[in-house]
Amino acid sequence: MQKVYKKDDELLSYEARKEILKKIGQEDLLKIFDNYKPNYKPIQRKKSPLDQQISLGISKEERKIIANEIKEIKRTGEKVTISSLVRSRAISEIDLEAWRERAKIGLKELNSLKWNKPEIEKKLRQLYSQFDEMKDDDDESALVLSKKIKEYEAMISELDRPTIRRSSRMSGRVTFNEANLIRWRASRLTITVADYMRFLIFGYLPFSEHDRHLSIDARRRFYVAILDVVQNGWGNPPKVEECPNCARYAHENQQLRKKLERLRNLSK
């Protein structure tokens, strides 16, 4: 992975994050960016216009959703493939206002007890100890403690609940510039390219079932990054190649040379 260039790294700077977290009264969350560096992996051009393949894991339910959408679109007489649908949505714009609201809610909620597994487990140990030391005839206190224990056990069960299993794959093809933009925006949001595309393709929102597979700190970084993008913009992907069609021209040139060589051999 190549580190983001300095001019673009400034959009992900410590001071920018500090200002965002200060506005929402959560400056203590700056530690989640310790040892975290934004990364951006440039890509190489190939010979065709739609030369970059993008793919992501999807669940059985998501596979059905896409299949049904393709059927509905085809009924209108419009020609569409999974690849073209993936491309059109993967390069679409995000509703940043809706995302900002979800990010703010997420940052606030993730600071609550129900997301703090070590603290919940600590409180459970205390309650179990109190319950063991309780007198046999203290039914009222036993009822109160039992209720609290069930509440905390329910929190643990929710945190341990399995995330969505995505065993199928879906792919599409995009241009070099589109692939570069997708990778850059995913990097700006501190999530993977696959996660970024999944949000756009299925219209998912942050702080939902669809980012539960991320760790708590990864979700926090994601939400802070959303606020950062709203405030500072996306920025531009670093330039990795000056000539936008060099690879295609080189391939065409090579094919022409081979054709010329064959003609020369036939004329001998």
Image (cartoon, rainbow, N blue to C red):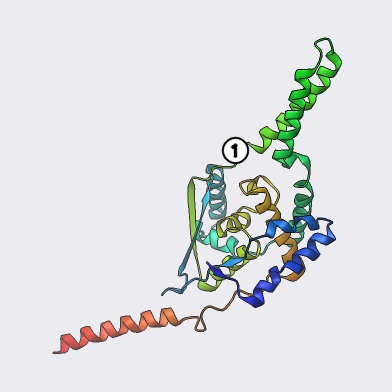
- Taking depth in this image into account, of 100 and 23 the one nearest to the observer is 23
* Position in image of residue 207 (x %, y %): 71, 49
The reply, left or right, for residue 244 in relation to residue 186 is left
How far across and down, in percent of the image, does residue 88 sit? 57, 63
38 left or right, relative to 227: left
Residue 92 position in % (x across, y down):
63, 64
Q: Is 133 above or below relative to 188? A: above
- The structure residue drawn at horizontal position 16% and vertical position 85%, both measured from the top left corner, is 266
Q: Is residue 101 left or right of residue 187?
A: right
Give residue 237's quadrant in the image: bottom right
Res 205 seen here: no
Residue indicated by mark 1 = 162
- Give the residue drawn at x 16%, y 89%: 267
* Residue placed most toward the observer, 88 or 185: 185
Q: Residues within 10 Å of mark 1 (few under 14, many from 20)?
A: few
Residue extending farthest to the left is: 268
Disc 1 marks a residue whose amino acid type is Pro
Residue 173 image offset from top left, x and y in percent: 48, 64
Q: Residue pushed farthest top?
A: 137
Q: Which image quarter is the C terminus in?
A: bottom left
**Count of numbered circles on the image:** 1
Observer-nearest of 194 and 64: 194
- In the image, taking residue 127 as reference, residue 52 lies left or right, namely left
Visible in this render: residue 207? yes
The residue at the point 31 percent across, 80 percent down is: 255
Q: Can you tell which quarter of the image residue 33 is in?
A: bottom right
Q: Secondary structure at mark 1?
A: loop
